């Protein structure tokens, strides 16, 4: 199973061989600096299904999500962020996506489970309605070790 796909390629692969993919867990994020919070979150997400697909925000979508303050984001280019996430054994597929939400990926891939960190709730999660419309469920994963990429960047730049 290749790990890095376009959304169209992954959709075709899942449709051709659903038994290899379902139940499918989808999650997404910037993953600008990989840290233990990300790793534990992805491990827990994988435990919810057979396969874990991770959407990595494109550079342009990260810029829209993380407007410049002290440091221009993303720090790491999208291809490198995707490669790092692909290297994790719990990750079965990675898709770089240009939107600021995972709504289009959800509509296309129709995940059985959409996983997000426990710092979200169903009221502030823009994907909630789309997941339910696609007959999926949402799992909010407890944050074991509160770690923030923005806090790490602040710590580095203040040193």
Image (cartoon, rainbow, N blue to C red):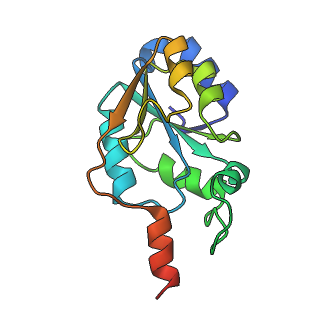
| Residue drawn at x 31%, y 28% as measured from the top left | 48
User: Residue 86: where, in percent of width, then height?
Assistant: 50, 46
Task: State the residue lying farthest toward the left.
Answer: 144
Please name whichever residue, 43 or 146, is drawn nearer the observer in this view of the structure.
146
Eyeballing the image, is 94 above or below 147?
above
Please name whichever residue, 135 or 90, is drawn nearer the observer in this view of the structure.
135
User: Residue 134: where, in percent of width, then height?
Assistant: 53, 13
Eyeballing the image, is 18 above or below 25?
above
Question: Is any part of residue 64 visible from this angle?
Answer: yes
Please name whichever residue, 137 or 108, is drawn nearer the observer in this view of the structure.
137
| Residue drawn at x 67%, y 34% as measured from the top left | 6
Number of labels in the image equals 0
Residue 52 placement: quadrant: top left
Task: State the residue lying farthest toward the front.
Answer: 123
| Residue drawn at x 64%, y 64% as measured from the top left | 73
Please name whichever residue, 76 or 70, is drawn nearer the observer in this view of the structure.
70
| Residue drawn at x 50%, y 65% as measured from the top left | 150
User: Residue 50: where, in percent of width, then height?
Assistant: 36, 24
Eyeballing the image, is 67 above or below 1?
below
User: Residue 4: where, in percent of width, then height?
Assistant: 59, 40
Task: State the residue lying farthest toward the bottom.
Answer: 159
Residue 32 placement: quadrant: bottom right
| Side of 114 where 6 appears, left or right | right
Eyeballing the image, is 55 above or below 158?
above
| Side of 32 where 90 appears, left or right | left
Question: Is any part of residue 17 visible from this angle?
Answer: no
Residue 16 placement: quadrant: top right
């Amino acid at each position: 199973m290749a790990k890095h796909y376009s959304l169209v390629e992954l959709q075709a692969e899942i449709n051709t061989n659903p038994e290899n993919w379902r139940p499918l867990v989808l999650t997404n994020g910037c993953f600008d600096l990989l840290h233990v919070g990300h790793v534990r979150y992805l491990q827990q997400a994988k435990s919810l299904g057979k396969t874990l697909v991770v959407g990595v925000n494109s550079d342009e979508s990260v810029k829209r999500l993380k407007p410049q303050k002290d440091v221009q984001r993303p720090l790491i280019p999208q291809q490198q962020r995707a490669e790092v996430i692909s290297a994790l054994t719990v990750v079965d597929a990675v898709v770089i996506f240009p939107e600021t939400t995972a709504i289009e990926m959800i509509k296309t891939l129709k995940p059985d489970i959409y996983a997000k960190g426990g710092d979200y709730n169903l009221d502030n999660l823009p994907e909630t309605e789309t997941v339910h419309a696609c007959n999926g469920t949402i799992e909010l994963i407890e944050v074991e070790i509160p770690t923030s990429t923005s806090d790490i960047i602040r710590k580095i730049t203040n040193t």
